Amino acid sequence: METDEKHDISKYLEALRRAKTDNEKFAALLMIAKISKDSSSDVTLKKEILDAVGGKFFSRLLKTNKVPEDCPPNIYKCVALSVLSALCRDPEVAISSVLTDNVTSFNSIILERPNESDTETKQLVDSTYDCFNSLCQSEQGLECLLKSKSISTFCQTVISQCYSFEKAHDMICCLVSCFGPDAWNGCEQSYHAYVNFLGRQFLEDETLHKFDMCKTLVFLLSAAPNDKEETIEPPWIRPIVRGLDNVLRSKIGPSQREQALKLASVMVHVCGIYSIQPPYTHDFKLFLLTTHLCCVEVRMILEDSDLTLASNKGRLLSSCYTFLECVINHLTSGATIDIDDRQVMQLHCAMVGAFGAVINFLKRVSMDTSVQWNSIILATVRVLGAWLAEETSALREEIYDLIPFLVQISKMCIPPDKVVKKLTNSESEPLSSENKVNGDIKSVENVDNDMDSNQNRSDVAEDNLKVLQDKTDDITSDCSNMEINGQNELDDCNSKSCGNSDKSSNINGESDSASNDCSKEKVDKATVEPSNDLDVDLDSENADKLNKLNDEDLSKEVKEANDADFVRDSKYEKEVLSPEELQELHAKADILHFLLPALCHLTAEEDPRHILLQCGGLGVLDLYMWRQWERFIDQSNLRETLSSLVILCNIFLNLIIVEPALVQENPEFSHVFLLVVKGIHLIELDPDYLVLWSHMITLGLMLARALDKNIDEFLEINSVNRFFVSSIRFLSGAYTTKHKKRQTTLDIVDTYKYVWEQISQTWFLSMQAFVYCVSMYKDLSGIVLKTGWIPALLKILNDVKANSVAEETRSCFVMLLTEIAKVNRSAKSVIKEKGGMDLARTYKSSELQVALQAS
């Protein structure tokens, strides 16, 4: 039978090839349509039929409206689509241009609205959907649908409730699954109209189908188009929120509540927490109810004795986490919500309970070696980071107990350097220890050969390689003994320098004010967007300079001690994760990024700071900072990287100010100073990096002040002097004169003014540290004189009205002039020549007068 069918098709195929008129070709095609509908012809024969008919003939059939008398109006279209739908079921045939070139015609056909008795048109539409399904079998076909904006047609079909609109909905879901938000490029209005239609249905439906619609809306909202700059609010917010309100206020079961909470989570993620508050709702009850329900779900899941329940309920748990993160951000930095004190206390108690469950869950995970690490554990650490960034007073003791585990998991999630990744991906043989010791491993952590290297840096790469390659080591260790030479990353919350108003004491202030200091201000877009003028070649050249390390000067004893530490850490990690699992962690999450704001708070408090230092946190922060600097050089995820580097600077500043003795005792600080000195030229004078520049200058000056006695052990003085020149550029560039109403006043330079709220504290702290460095470094006063800063500063101060200079600013400038005059005779002469004595009298500075009058 099959042979007969193939013979018949071949016969009509030959007739197609011999056809000289359209009528002859159509007659042969009509016979092929009847035979091929249920035929299982091979791919080659199907392609031959399409080639014989030709794309142009199919296009004419699909587009013409003129048909012979007494024939159905869609006879040509029906025959063409019958053949196409039958032949193009095979993916190899579906990519034919005959199909892809006619997508526009397909789009118009499915918009037809046949009546109940019009079976011909219904069959026509069904065949068209068969062609669409065939196109979806290949990447080329999907791209064709995307380019033809078929998704807009599908949306219109569903909204108009055309025939087989369910199939149109399935096609929308298929395209969104394949392309995500990009599926809506150029079709944003169709998206909003479609979701609004579904939202109204969700609001009006009173059956169990309402909860199936929850799933659909979650799916579509998760792939919302990238039209964030749209000023008009989406029309679908109100119906969806009203529908959610009705659901959550009703008596529903656990499965229905789960779907509703997932929808609430994606709503606040896409539209913001304001979408479930007035004016979209009558009051704040929906906001409070949803928050309480999320807290309850978190507790029910995490407090269960079976730890695997968290994985089984992973989607719900992640949705609750997302919602709670939005609530935390809103309560700490959003507009005031109109709820009474009792509701505030209830809300806080509910969240304390939920995060108590989070902390206890992570404690159980840390003690259970059989638990499989997965994305849920990482998501749990992330949401805890959001909580700790704003609230460190509640659950204080529980949080302190968890710090060693957070340090451990943070270390494991720090991505390896480029060399480790390359070796792992290429499956190359493990490097011998001799090769590693001789400096064959190069990374951005390495520094110029013209200076002595920090003793621990050469082995950081060894540490990572051992984690991945050394499978025979039997040495075990306790986490509390881990010493990691490394660096840390920053939160994408670019906070002001953590501190109080007293710039000379502590950048974080007292521990009881820690919750007000860090990560409460988002990064200004102007400070974090990548610079279009960035010279990538220059970055690569400088990166190469940083990639050279001289291991020859390292003592044998130090190497052996470091090797022992790294082997110990490596073994500890492999007891928890296999090398493959460790790589998967690196690929999935950079968990320390979310913990940085919390660490910024914790380093300002005595007890958690000591725990953090004892369990190796300083080394983790060091390693992480170098990894972030490597990402910055690569221009990788620049916005997040910049904010991370800023918070890292704040953390190290906290440690330097609160416990200055740490700087001399821990080589990590020397290594961080190395990064600052060698990398500062990559960001100076670039307005896009002004916030980071200010923080690195401040950190560098504070370290220069603390390390002045042994700085020559790991840096050449020329490198330090180049850093001081960059510091002068930053400090001298902040102020200028402004002429207004016949008087001259002191004003912030426009470039600085845009981000002054974020950098003002670091500028004042830098000025104070710079003044201290003037007397510590003999070359610094001469550098200041050569840059011309002193005459320019004196001119500004003499030109402006004294009362226009703030007391804090005046004090900084006068301190600088006084110190320069004390240590450098030439500078003193310049100050006197440029009106220094008059200035001292104007600003009532007896110290400056004495310094200028001294012989």
Image (tube, rainbow, N blue to C red):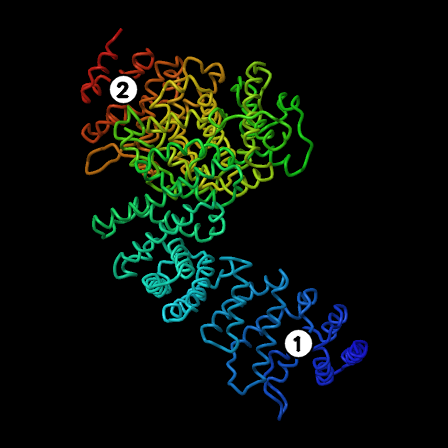
Q: Is residue 670 above or below residue 585?
A: above
Quarter assignment of residue 676: top left
Left or right: residue 286 compared with residue 254: left
Q: Position of residue 384 (x, y in %)?
A: 39, 41
Q: Which mark is residue 815?
A: 2
Q: Is residue 584 above or below residue 853?
A: below
Front: mark 1 or 2: 1
At x 38% / y 69%, what residue is drawn? 200
In the image, farthest residue toward the top = 855
Q: Is residue 30 above or below residue 588?
A: below
Mark 1: which secondary structure? helix
At x 66% / y 28%, what residue is drawn? 431
Q: Nearer the viewer, residue 500 or 677?
A: 500
- Mark 2, other Cα within 10 Å: few <14 / some 14–19 / many ≥20: some
* Residue 135 in view here: yes
Circle count:
2
Residue highlighted by disc 1 = 58
Left or right: residue 579 compared with residue 607: right
